[in-house]
Image (cartoon, helix red, strand yellow):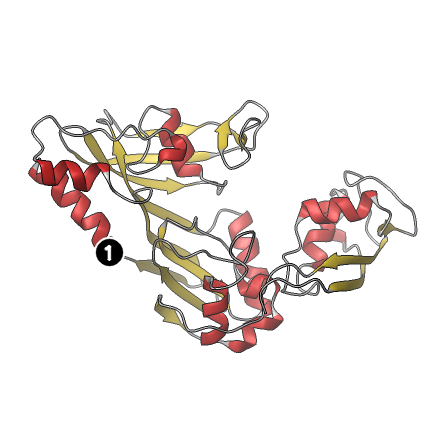
């Protein structure tokens, strides 16, 4: 299908439950409408905010601000039109590994270079389209069951909800920080010691493709542990406490250790002084940020038992580490 010029009419109603009393309207609407708004385009708070400002999402029939506090028993009414820009429906056969699957969750090991969901420049051919090829019933879920996402060039583990109940429970677990996400990263420079990086992150005002540390950003906490030090690089284990866009990349760059291959965040193409020509080429020409989601632990949405998954670094990261070991 690819790009589409068709518009979709979205009509939804909801009553504010007691647990959302006092919450912002846009946040409440995102929670209440997430399972009903369709999977072709994700329902985001920014989209809901536009609808609220346009008077297409009302509270007890009144046009109010996105930040308006809601009260238990109030009625939300959404009647809006949105463009169906990208293909969230077509099933494709794509190359990615399924680590685990049951009736409720799917855990995949995403290769570097695979885009997670349709968007600008990638209308299809994404992990979402591959998931639909694996489980066509995911098409009825918002965002085809995605609970998290990884950057295109980040490899590793992701969990996907296989039904609406799992999507709700895993979403809550993510917000409550009960899903553990661990990464392996190869950073430039020698990281001196384990540390916790607690720096807020927001969009870079001069480059919308970047995130940056900024005082008015959202809370972001990354726990950094040194795995192995090389002559001019460090293998790092990073555990996310929060989940901001590009968080590991931004935080390591902020402390002076951008990831190998991460040109967007200041990688300097450092080469160890004793490296051979082949070793230098492997390091300097590494084609992506050296970041791999290596471990994922979460409460299973049915029963709550803890499940834990691990992924070995892919071949390109292994080759990079070998070059650093030998240099």
| Quadrant position of residue 238 | top left
Question: Which x, y percent locates residue 138?
Answer: 55, 72
| Quadrant position of residue 227 | top left
Q: Is residue 140 left or right of residue 297?
A: right
Regarding residue 235, the answer to whether it shows in the image is yes
Question: Which x, y percent locates residue 296?
Answer: 37, 55
Regarding residue 304, the answer to whether it shows in the image is no
Front-most of 102 and 316? 316
In the displayed structure, 137 sits above or below 72; it is below
Q: Is residue 179 left or right of residue 2?
A: left
Question: Which x, y percent locates residue 14?
Answer: 80, 60
- What residue is at 11 percent from the left and 41 percent from the top? 278
| Quadrant position of residue 312 | bottom left
Front-most of 89 and 250? 89
Q: Which residue is mark 1?
A: 312
Name the quarter where the C terminus is drawn.
top left
Question: Which x, y percent locates residue 37?
Answer: 70, 63
- What residue is at 53 percent from the left and 31 percent from the top? 207
Front-most of 121 and 134? 121
Name the quarter where the N terminus is drawn.
bottom right
- What residue is at 45 percent from the left and 34 percent from the top? 221
For mark 1, give the secondary structure: loop
Q: Crowding near pointer 1: few (<14 within 10 Å), some, many (20+)?
A: some
Q: Farthest right residue?
A: 61
In the displayed structure, 52 sits above or below 226; it is below
Q: Is residue 107 left or right of residue 10?
A: left
């Amino acid at each position: 299908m690819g790009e589409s010029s068709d518009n979709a009419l979205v009509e939804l109603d909801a009553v504010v439950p007691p647990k959302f009393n006092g919450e912002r309207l846009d946040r409440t609407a995102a929670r209440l409408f997430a399972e009903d708004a369709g999977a072709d385009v994700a329902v985001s708070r920014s989209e809901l905010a536009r609808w609220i400002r346009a008077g297409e999402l009302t509270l007890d029939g009144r046009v109010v601000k996105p930040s308006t506090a809601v009260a238990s028993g109030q009625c939300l009414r959404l009647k809006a039109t949105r463009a169906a820009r990208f293909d969230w429906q077509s099933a494709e056969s794509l190359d990615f590994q399924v680590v685990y699957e049951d009736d409720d969750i799917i855990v995949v090991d995403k290769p570097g270079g695979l885009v997670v969901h349709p968007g600008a420049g990638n209308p299809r051919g994404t992990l979402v389209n591959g998931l639909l090829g694996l489980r066509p019933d995911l098409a009825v879920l918002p965002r085809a069951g995605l609970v998290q996402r990884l950057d295109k060039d980040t490899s590793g583990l992701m969990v996907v909800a296989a039904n609406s109940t799992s999507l709700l429970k895993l979403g809550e677990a993510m917000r409550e920080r009960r899903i553990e996400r661990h990464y392996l990263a190869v950073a430039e420079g020698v990281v001196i010691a384990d540390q916790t990086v607690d720096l807020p992150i927001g969009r870079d005002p001069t480059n919308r493709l970047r995130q940056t540390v900024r005082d008015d950003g959202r809370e972001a906490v990354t726990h950094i542990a040194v795995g192995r030090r090389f002559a001019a690089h460090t293998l790092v284990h990073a555990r996310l406490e929060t989940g901001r866009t590009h968080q590991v990349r931004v935080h390591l760059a902020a402390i002076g250790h951008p990831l190998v291959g991460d040109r967007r965040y200041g990688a300097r193409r450092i080469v160890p002084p004793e490296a051979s020509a082949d070793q230098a080429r492997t390091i300097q020409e590494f084609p992506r940020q050296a970041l791999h989601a290596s471990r994922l632990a979460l409460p299973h949405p049915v029963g709550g038992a803890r499940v834990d998954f691990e992924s070995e670094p892919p071949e390109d990261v292994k080759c990079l580490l070998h070059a650093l070991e030998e240099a």
